[in-house]
Amino acid sequence: MALDYRKCAEEISANIGGGANVISAAHCATRLRLVIADNSKLNKAALENVDGVKGMFESNGQLQLIIGTGTVNKVYDEFLAVTGVSAASKDDVKKAAANKMPLWKRS
């Protein structure tokens, strides 16, 4: 059965604290890259069990959800529609994540 992109995006949104908790969002070839305002609102266990999410990790201030080639862009489009978050580039997300880091960690 094909993945329901909208449902996947809605479940991701519900488990990250909604669009208001997203500072920036972009995607690369396989991952949805998010910068989250308040990490205490994340439900990591639920995120790992969202249909369509193959894995998850945090790196350099970004929450990265592994979704897969040819699918991540469709989930991303639905995620933007569901959350009202503006599209960003990978560089925008990197900058937002860097700004969230403590001064001594910024490069």
Image (cartoon, rainbow, N blue to C red):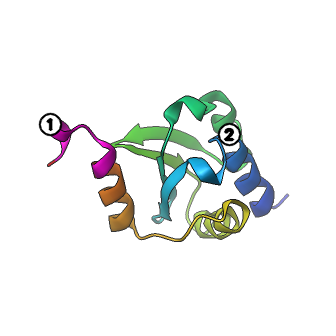
The kind of residue on which mark 1 rests is Trp
Does the magenta stretch mainly form a helix, a strand or a loop? helix
The residue drawn where x is 59% and y is 54% is 67
Q: Nearer the viewer, residue 26 or 3?
A: 26
Q: Nearer the viewer, mark 1 or mark 2?
A: 1
Residue range corresponding to the magenta coloring: 99-106
Query: Dividing the picture into quarters, in which one does residue 58 lie?
Result: top left
The CA span between labels 1 and 2 is: 30 Å
Q: Is residue 14 above or below residue 9?
A: above
The residue drawn where x is 45% and y is 64% is 28
Q: Nearer the viewer, residue 46 or 101?
A: 101
The residue drawn where x is 35% and y is 50% is 97
Describe residue 39's horizontal placement relative to residue 42 as left or right.
left
Is residue 25 inside the magenta stretch? Answer: no
What is the number of the mark on residue 15? 2
Describe residue 1's horizontal placement relative to residue 80 as left or right.
right
Is residue 105 inside the magenta stretch? Answer: yes
The residue drawn where x is 33% and y is 45% is 100
Task: Identify residue for label 1.
Answer: 104
Residue 31 location (% of width, % of height): 50, 56
Tell me the SS state at disc 2. Answer: loop
Q: Is residue 103 above or below residue 98?
A: above
Residue 91 in view: yes
Tell me the SS state at disc 1. Answer: helix
The kind of residue on which mark 2 rests is Asn
Residue 7 location (% of width, % of height): 80, 55
